[in-house]
Amino acid sequence: MNNFVFYNPTKLVFGKNTVEKIGEYLKKDKIKKVLFLAGGGSIKKNGVYEKVARALFESSIEKVEVLGVRPNPVLSKVKEALEVARREKVDAILAVGGGSVIDSAKAVAAGVNYDGDVWDFYSGKTRVKEAIPLYTILTLSATGTEMNGNSVVTNEETLEKFSFSSIHVYPKVSIVDPEVQYTLPPNQTVNGAVDAISHVMEYYFDGTRNTQLIDRVDEGIIKTLVETTEILLENPKDYEARANFALSTTLALNGISGMGHSGGDWSSHAIEHALSALNPEVAHGAGLAVVFPAWLTYVKDLISDKLVRFGMEIFGREDGISALKRWYKKIGAPTTLRELGFEREDIDKLVNIASKMTPMGRLKKLMKEDVRKILEIAF
Ligand code: NZQ
Ligand code: ZN
């Protein structure tokens, strides 16, 4: 086990009827005016918008809205929201949505008082030094963004889907009310499961030894996701399954699942980001269902014992990679690049996009040609 520091400043407010509490939390922090950031309209259909608007009104908190953040969020939308946040001199950002909305909100929170181009945080030109407070109401459990400092955005001009991480953009308060997720289409639940399982696997398979406790925690998270996903595909309104699923996705990427590890591998994530940068219709979770098993196949000799343990613990079978792929198929996740709509000619484009992130990986350092081989396995 490696040395580590764990610090997570986000207050997690979890459970039924918690959305309406947002007013109280903002008021307690003396917030008077928020930038209300949301996606393409799901919150207007399922009543979440109404609830939040009422809670803000009752607590006398003013809001200015920027709606229309799309999945695989883009830099231009972040810039639009930034302009509004600056012009309206908001005290805080309130993000209501899934990972795309919350990640965009993090960029806005960090960018308000930064004079340069907000892309500088993603390109690595500069680090985030401060941010205005961010509050979130999560409507899709998947990314863990509600309790971490990561933001992932696509620069649609350069086709770079890059991330930054900063302690300054951890949400101050995140509300996770599993009931608001009853309206998720089944494929979003599946994408969420695959994403969270992949977050745990990035650590679990990073080659760190002697992590007995966290291995068991990680296996617990994955097993819970497997069980609850199957229940939710049958009954999307099973509260206990939604709640256990939601908590699993939060714990998958809030620092706990990687304690004592050497930081995680993250090459499957980097390669997936190339897929969704090239084709924004590819959901992050769907891309990972294709890339992660291909990466595991490419590096399997380095983690053969762990793969057997994984297969036995999660699926009761020794061949962990086939068992995982079989389960992905069972829940309706894609497992090949072709199913995602890519052609063989796209592999070159994907390799070029991903090569901006090479060398990548911790278990095995991957260069451009390794990425190509993994994509060929995934085809
Ligand atoms: O836009 P609306 O209309 O709200 O619809 C959304 C969107 O179409 C819909 N949705 C959300 N909540 C709903 C709902 N539909 C019905 N009922 C609800 N309650 O779901 C669709 C997808 O939303 P999105 O936010 O894009 O999904 P997700 O939460 O999976 O976020 C994915 C993004 O997060 C990044 C991904 O790369 C991707 O860009 N990631 C962020 C991470 C982080 N910050 O730590 C880590 C991850 O590895 C990942 O890279
Ligand atoms: Zn992910």
Image (tube, rainbow, N blue to C red):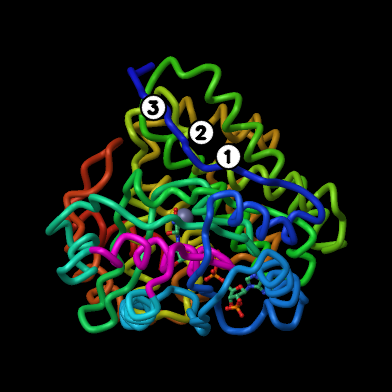
Q: Is residue 25 magenta?
A: no
Q: Secondary structure at mark 3?
A: loop
Instruction: Reply yes or no: does residue 100 show up in magenta.
Output: yes
Alpha carbon of mark 1 to alpha carbon of mark 2: how far? Answer: 7 Å
Residue 251: mark in rendering: 1
Marks 3 and 1, how far apart at CA:
15 Å
Which of the two residues, 303 or 13, is positioned nearer the viewer here? 13
Q: CA distance from mark 3 to mark 2?
A: 9 Å
Q: Nearer the viewer, residue 302 or 273?
A: 273
Label count reads 3
Which quadrant would residue 365 be assigned to in this image? top left
Position of residue 244 measured from the top left corner of the image (x, y, whole percent): 75, 44
On screen, residue 369 versus residue 75, left or right, reads left
Q: In this rendering, is residue 203 above or below 232?
A: above
Residue for badge 2: 257
Q: Tell me which amino acid carries mark 1.
A: Leu
Q: Are marks 1 and 2 in contact (CB under 8 Å)?
A: yes
The residue carrying mark 3 is 261
Question: What residue type is disc 3 on?
Answer: His
Magenta part of the chain: 89-113
Dot 1 surroundings within 10 Å: few (below 14), some, or many (20 or more)?
A: many
Tell me the element at label 2.
Answer: loop
Residue 186 x %, y %: 72, 69
Front residue of 371/222: it is 222
Please, is residue 88 above or below residue 167 in the view? below
Residue drawn where x is 38% and y is 73% of the image = 89
